Image (cartoon, rainbow, N blue to C red):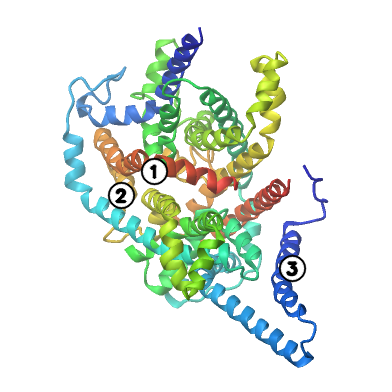
Amino acid sequence: MSAPPSPAETPVLAIAGEAASSMGAASSAPRRRGESPAARSGGARRRLRRRGARRRLRRQLIAWGFIAPVAVYMILFYAFPLYQNLDLSFREYTLRSFIDGTAPFVWFENYAEILQSSAFMPALINTGVFTIVSIVFQYSIGLALAVFFFKRFPLAATLRALFLVPWLLPLLVSASTWAWMLNSESGVVNAGLALVGVPQINWLTSPQWAMVSVLIANIWIGIPFNLVILYSGLQGIPNDIYEAASLDGANGWQTFWRITFPLLRPVSAITILLGLVYTLKVFDIIWIMTRGGPGNASTTFAIWSYRLGFGGGSPELSPAAAVGNLLILIAFVFGLIYIRTQRRMENS
Amino acid sequence: MISVRRIANTVIGLVLTALMLFPLYWMVNVSLTQPTELRKDPPNLFPLNPTFEGYRTVLDEQLPFLGTSLIIGLGTVMLTLILAAPAGFALAKLRPRGRTAVDFTLLIAQMIPSIIMAMGFYLIFFNWGILDTVPGLILADSTLAVPFAVLIFTAFMSGIPDELMNAAKIDGASEWRTFRSVILPVSRNSIVTVSLFAFLWAWSDFIFASTLNRGGDFQPITMGIYKYIGNNTQDWNAIMATAVVASVPAALLLIVAQRYVAAGVTAGAVKD
């Protein structure tokens, strides 16, 4: 493994460096070709070089011709909405604005309003708790299952494939099903708990259980994804290491902690970071199961933003956009960490 | 001795899978339960006295929603493939300048929460007059799949040997011709993977549907279920029947294209 890059080296810089080196590689090829016949006159060489430059320009134009549709698309359907959202968060956009198209510019007023809102602290804490607890359980359960299914036994592949189903279902479907299973009076979960003497729990309607409920559903949905990625990571660990370990008399537990877990670290890092980015986005599950309630008990930034913008009668699009932009800021930080980690993995 | 342990593992595996899939079983079970028995405590573990009333309701009321979802799903797949496949080819094979910047943008794009995109789209679609329309939703849903698709195509097409391209070039084929007649046919696997995910994401989308198509005449199935939950908190067997029907495409695709699913999940995260 190579040494880790210095902390100062941001991904952007790394990218710039890489781009420069690949350009260098592309331009050095024709020059080398021009050198070989020493008798060539300066003019001919210059002409050749010019022709090479033209050919390279043509190649670039063709390449970008293929990319152009996506580039235009990204500008129209990513950059433009994001700009629109940013603009929105600095204005006071009301129902009137839809009619006459004007909205006064109010600088950071919307942001100040959000930061002072009584919903801010609960949303921040809930987003943190929801994200961290989800990931801890999704990862550890996913890893345990990956190790289990990595053993060879009849039906292993089929059962592992069946584990994927919950991940492919529409989130709305999973959320509705969980909502009904956790129903206070007629839910199967409470019925099951009653068998072992646990009194009725108001899963979705009591402040202390609402968060637990949405966490259970979200963890359930995230397990397949963790299982698949970690399983593919296990496949990448060379078998002879395990053979050597078993020759040395290591037991299953030692093998896991001394070999599997450390060697899986790069894949684990990616899994957890992707989990972070995905969990920050979670909306459907919470909205369907609790709508962020009761009160603000299960309101995250995503839910808060949606509720402001589309949840009530009169849309408060500007504060909603401001909440959304805070969320983007958090996601962006994790995104940068993700890309850094992936680059480091590719280099090692 | 060894075989005993293997069978024990199979049994444990079956139990774990059953636990994991229990909510799905429960969804089917409730969808077949008589409305009068829905509130029974404890609930019936099996549909002893099954009714297909819930499914009849689905067929009566939800077919237009299902049709709309199908059109949106297929439209999203088409748009995604048309945009992403050529870009993937160029990024993988034509050495464009700034390719790393493009890759970087695509990675970041996948991390933007949909609710934020929805808000921006809302105003844009309002101004363009495509709020509450199917084409508007196809455009919005494609944003879920396009960056992912370009990255998958790039990764896959990088693996196609250069000799194949050079042979086409010697025969005098243009880049476009090479892409169409050589690269696309050998990229079948990645086309299937991308289509699968683009379709499923569009089919499952709720956030764009509920923000950008709140009042349209043609709404997708997720809105169908959502309205159902809002209006009929009693008819849970019909809600669950709709949920079962809405899950059918996912289940079918998983059975038909199992290895593409696993390939897509891992390729999205770990490049090898």
Q: Residue at x 36, y 34 (%)?
A: A177
Q: Residue A194 appears at what percent x and percent y?
A: 40, 14
Amino acid under disc 3: Ala
Q: Residue A131 appears at what percent x and percent y?
A: 60, 39
User: According to the image, label 3 marks what residue?
Assistant: A20
Name the front one of labels 3 and 2: 3
Left or right: A120 in relation to B224: right
Q: Residue at x 29, y 35 (%)?
A: B240
User: According to the image, label 2 marks what residue?
Assistant: B221
Amino acid under disc 1: Pro
Q: Residue B17 appears at what percent x and percent y?
A: 42, 24
* Residues at marks 2 and 1 touching, judged by CB atoms closer than 8 Å: yes
Respond whether the residues carrying marks 1 and 3 are from the same subunit: yes
User: According to the image, label 1 marks what residue?
Assistant: A170
Provide the secondary structure element on which disc 1 rests. Answer: loop
**Cα–Cα span, label 2 and label 1:** 10 Å
**Cα–Cα span, label 1 and label 3:** 43 Å
| Quadrant of res A188 | top left
Q: Residue at x 48, y 30 (%)?
A: A206
